[in-house]
Image: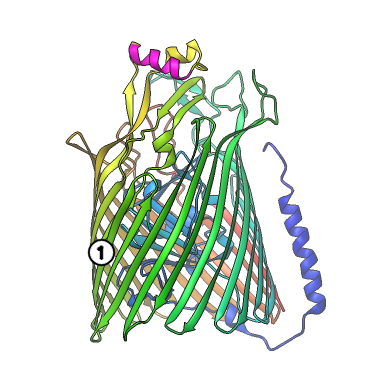
Amino acid sequence: MKYASKTTFLLISFLFAITSLTAQVHKMVRRDTSAVLRNYELNPVVVTGSGHHQRLKSTATPVHVLSRQEIKEQGISTFEDALTRMLPQVSMAPNSMGTFLRLNGLGNKYILILVNGQKLSGDISNNVDLTRINMSRVKRIEVLDGAASSLYGSDAIAGVINIITDQPTQQMLSITSDTRVSGKGKLTQSVNVDMYGNGFGSYTTITHDRADSYQNNSLEYIKGSDTETQPTIAPFFTGYRADMLSQKFTFEPVRHLALNAGIDYSRKITDRPNTNPDINGGNDYEMRYKSLRWNVGGIYKFSSRNSLQASFYIDRYRYGKQYDMATKTYVPGDYVQSKKQRTMEGEMKAILGLISNSTTIIGAGWRRDMLKATSGNIDKQVYTLAAYVQHEQKFLNDLTATVGLRMTHHETFGNHYTPKATIMYAPGNIRLRATYSAGFRAPGLDELYYHYFSVNRGKAQISFGNKHLSPEKSNYFALNAEYHTQSYTIGVTGFYNRINDMIVRNNIDVDAQSLAMLQAEFPEMTADQAAKLERYSVYQNSDNGDVKGMQVNASVNFLRDFELSANYAWTYARSQTNGEWTVLDRSIRNSAVVALNYHHVWNRYGLNVNLNGRFQSKTYYNAYEDAPGFGVLNLQTTHSFDCCSWAFIEPSIGIDNIFDRVDRRIDSANRKYALYSPGRMITVGLKVRLKK
């Protein structure tokens, strides 16, 4: 560990101070044991599929819902674990640059991540910094498969992940501390302070998240050899320290008007081994990230079926290198900024019940994206205007149809139209759905304008943008059948997603002529770096994508306190370059997640036992060795004590990776991974809630 964080001490001190204050002012009232009960949300309210609140069974577009209760029962404390343990169509690859996320075979740049309907911006080489998501406030996570640009605009080609946060609206003062510890220095801790009264709410969160770097094998193959090895200190998983401060206010001055404002500040720094002249794998610097996000918004309800909503947010994200070791240019403590991003977005929409059994959404939005990258020699910005309309109509009692259209005007690419049409037939307990939707993704500022030069471990890395790129477009088709009762639910979905003009980095071999060009473009490149340069890359519209898949989802409540859920995904993702089809990089053909849950209450004590697992076949890599498949099981027990009217305690203990599944292959230049677990680990948690 390179530095000692004071955050844990501050959080504990803060909690004790608030606890003492609350204990002095609380008033004893009748006890309520509802905190230890398990509430089965068979038909939760969702918003992502249709753009307005409706019950899950009523939405014509299928949506996967990960509830706060299910997340807690599995002992999940990170956003990555929530998705990969509960959704088989999602996979993750963590690294020092963030997390490479895939949904239904497609990567980060095709997945739109929202927080309460607003885009989460900021990435490093298309790797998303998911530590910015405050899991202590998550009410539910809604995942919409497939293209959704008719409602959400650019980037929503693979799907949309919408994190819905929660804030209490009961007259109360509540303080909650939630701590979880496991092996390899992993710690997540949060303190929430919630106050609500007379229409005014204040919701404060302080979080600290950290993990140590670790190796699963301390050897690596010597470059150019498949037999000779040498020791390395390069981490298999890169450790980090992350902190977040979040504040949100809500206010209802009159019955029909609700206002909100919030601000989130986060910081993160990696924790890698320092450069060592006697062994490979160390680094002179850490990656440091900072973000500041604030938003304001409101909703005015004319009636139960008619409302007007408005929102505006600014999201600033930046990262760079903070040096730990002295180099020829820098001394320890120096910070060199690599990239700064900023997104500003405003939206207004009306949700109207113009005629009986219908909902119409009319909206308009404006967005400005800005990028400044030192290593990419870029300082650009672009604006986007959008207008959209969607109408949902229920016919008779069992038939619902939705049509929508979005017009997007991009400063560089002009106008683009993305339609959507869905239909649902729902007699009794059966749901039959058919969906068509178009997707659209405007090239990023880096893909358009990069003039990138960087040096990593003595090797030059060069990329060029392309001002002549075309937007990526997709057509998504899906059929869904679902049957549900009070005891069980089973659903089957088949889909096809066709992506045209995919933007890829085309690697070009360096010859004498191109080397001379590169040396003229980047005079800072040394002769030694030029001699080692083998290829450079240029962004091009060279690929088409083709993703076919099927998902099977089932859950059953059997006996009295048991629930079993199982979800399977088959995905065949491929891309076409110059007429030749290849399996899409990092795609997985077969994957499944299962969870068996037991919950019982004895008076004021509740016991929850959850056994869950993920199983997947090999991960395909085009330019690297395929990563083998795996199966991992986890066990979590949670113990809830409703002590009194003002205190609730919930300790937990579990085992991650019960059977100690680990990928211990020796690292090489031709090897990639899919399983990043360090092996079997005990997890311990404690949640304490005090309320008045």
Q: Is disc 1 placed on a helix, strand or loop? A: strand
From the top left corner, tell me how far across and down residue 141 is, in percent.
46, 64
- Left or right of 308, for residue 393: left
- Residue 228 found in image quarter: top left
- Residue 350 found in image quarter: bottom left
Overall secondary structure of the magenta section: helix
Q: Residue at x 33, y 49 (%)?
A: 414
Q: In front: 228, or 477?
A: 477
> What crowding class fits label 1: few (fewer than 14 Cα within 10 Å), some (14-19), or many (20 or more)?
some
Q: In front: 535, or 199?
A: 199
Q: Residue at x 48, y 15 (%)?
A: 529
Q: Is residue 389 magenta?
A: no
- Residue 640 found in image quarter: bottom right
Q: In front: 482, or 377?
A: 377
Q: Which residue is mark 1?
A: 493
Residue furthest right as drawn: 24
From the top left corner, tell me how far across and down residue 549 is, in percent.
24, 55
From the top left corner, tell me how far across and down residue 374 is, in percent.
54, 31
Magenta-colored span: 513-522
> Please, is residue 421 above or below residue 367 in the view?
below
| Quadrant location of the N terminus in the rendered image | top right
Q: Residue at x 29, y 34 (%)?
A: 622
> Would residue 675 be visible to someone looking at this image?
yes
Q: Is residue 519 magenta?
A: yes
From the top left corner, tell me how far across and down residue 317 is, in percent.
56, 46
| Quadrant location of the C terminus in the rendered image | bottom right
| Callout 1 amino acid | Thr
- Left or right of 669, for residue 355: left
